[in-house]
Amino acid sequence: MHEFPQTITAITKGKRKMNTSLALKIEKALGIEEGFFMILQVYYDIAMEKQKQHAAHPDLSLLRPVLFWDTDIRSIDWKKQRRAVILRVFERGNSTEKNEILRFYGRSTVAKILKEHGSYLTL
């Protein structure tokens, strides 16, 4: 195929995208139908985009708007303001809201912030 092994390795490890030229070479060498690897690449790209969109904020349907009465819940920067969000939810939230924050930020991040706060709040 006249391709560097590093190129194939980078693609199989998800560090590099499949391109059309290489896909055609591989498909021809393996006797696979044309377009197979590009279709796989598109499915992978869609999955990564969905993951990015989902990771942008917690599931807002699980958080009561009254919990964030002083701000528009859609305008919160969930990464930059994670400390304030975590403390507020663990001070005033119900178990569903706490579980969603745990899922979104991860148990270790939440535990660290609650410990740094040094209050009665616990997981």
Image (spheres, grey):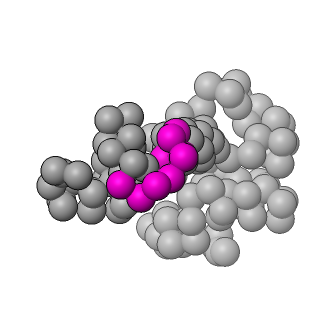
Q: Is residue 87 visible?
A: no
Reply above or below: 8 against 120: above
Q: Is residue 90 left or right of residue 84?
A: right
Question: Where residue 51 appears, x then y in whole percent?
Answer: 58, 47
Q: Is residue 1 left or right of residue 102?
A: left
Residue occupying image coordinates x 54% and y 46%: 33
Question: Where residue 115 appears, x then y in whole percent?
Answer: 49, 72
Residue occupying image coordinates x 77% and y 32%: 69
Question: Where residue 65 appears, x then y in whole percent?
Answer: 82, 35
Reply above or below: 70 against 117: above
Q: Is residue 36 left or right of residue 95?
A: left
- Mark count: 0
Residue occupying image coordinates x 16% and y 50%: 2
Q: Quadrant of residue 110?
A: bottom right
Q: Quadrant of residue 94?
A: bottom right
Q: Is residue 110 left or right of residue 9?
A: right
Pick the quarter of the image with the C terminus: bottom right
Camera-side residue: 18 or 98?
Answer: 18
Residue occupying image coordinates x 62% and y 25%: 75
* Magenta stretch in the rendered image: 29-37
Q: Is residue 42 visible?
A: yes
Question: Where residue 68 appears, x then y in whole percent?
Answer: 73, 36
Camera-side residue: 19 or 48?
Answer: 19
* Residue 4 among those drawn in magenta: no
